[in-house]
Image (cartoon, rainbow, N blue to C red):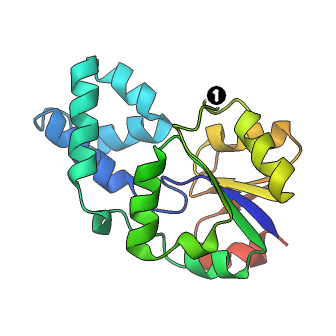
Amino acid sequence: MNILWDFDGTLFDTYPAFTEAMYLLLDGKVDKHTILKELKISFSNATKVFQLTENEILKFKEIELSLSPSLKPPFPYVEDVLKRSGCNVIMTHKPKQEVHTILDYYDFHQYFQGIVAGDDGFPRKPHAASYQFLHDRHYLDLAVGDRELDILPAKEIGLRTCLFQNDTAGADFYVKSYRDFYDIIK
């Protein structure tokens, strides 16, 4: 099976680090549960909800980049899935250097045959151009993400979809733990 993966919140548990960075930026004036809820919708959503200025957005990115990759671990059992897949590719809005920093830290480069990152010039999700680009090169079967935004472009180009730790209607499969991944998507 050839799989397209979202990065943040799907392969790597980065949201606790993002939440901490936003909490620091907001000087503790917003509780972490509220921050996480807004970030899970999207970073753009969170910037609007918390009325961040361009300077504050840059400061958030500075704080987040300063956090060790050790605070952004892969989800349990995802490595087992990556090892069993025929081909794995990543489509993320995260800048490519940040992706490589985390992949290097966990020695995960070996599992990926392609990456489209936020600075590669493709339109942002839910536009399907980056998904189509990866599909044309790697003959993908499935797209896995943690938000509806991750599966919409996959559905548009005819891929099966899987939502991770999200029950939003519209996916073909739902997975709470990667331990059960292959049992669920059969």
The correct choice, above or below, for 3 with respect to 149 in the image is below
Q: Position of residue 15 (x, y in %)?
A: 38, 52
If the image is split into quadrants, where does the C terminus sit?
Answer: bottom right
Give the number of callouts: 1
**Residue drawn at (23%, 40%), measured in percent from left and top?**
62
**Residue drawn at (70%, 29%), measured in percent from left and top?**
127
Q: Is residue 99 left or right of residue 92?
A: left
Q: Is residue 33 left or right of residue 160?
A: left
Task: State whether residue 156 appears in this view.
Answer: yes
Q: Say what secondary structure mark 1 lies in.
A: loop
Q: Is residue 119 left or right of residue 62?
A: right
Task: State whether residue 170 appears in this view.
Answer: no
The correct choice, above or below, for 115 with respect to 112 in the image is above
**Residue drawn at (26%, 17%), measured in percent from left and top?**
53
Are there few (<14), some (14-19), or many (20+) residues within 10 Å of tag 1? few
Quadrant hosting residue 184: bottom right
The front one of 137 and 83 is: 137
Q: Position of residue 103 (x, y in %)?
A: 46, 66
Residue kind at label 1, given as amino acid type? Pro
Residue that numbered label 1 is attached to:
123
Q: Position of residue 123 (x, y in %)?
A: 64, 28
If the image is split into quadrants, where does the N terminus sit?
Answer: bottom right
The correct choice, above or below, for 174 with respect to 54 in the image is below
The front one of 88 and 45 is: 88
Quadrant hosting residue 175: bottom right
Quadrant hosting residue 39: top left
The front one of 88 and 25 is: 88
**Residue drawn at (28%, 19%), measured in percent from left and top?**
54
Q: Is residue 52 left or right of residue 104?
A: left
The correct choice, above or below, for 43 with respect to 166 in the image is above
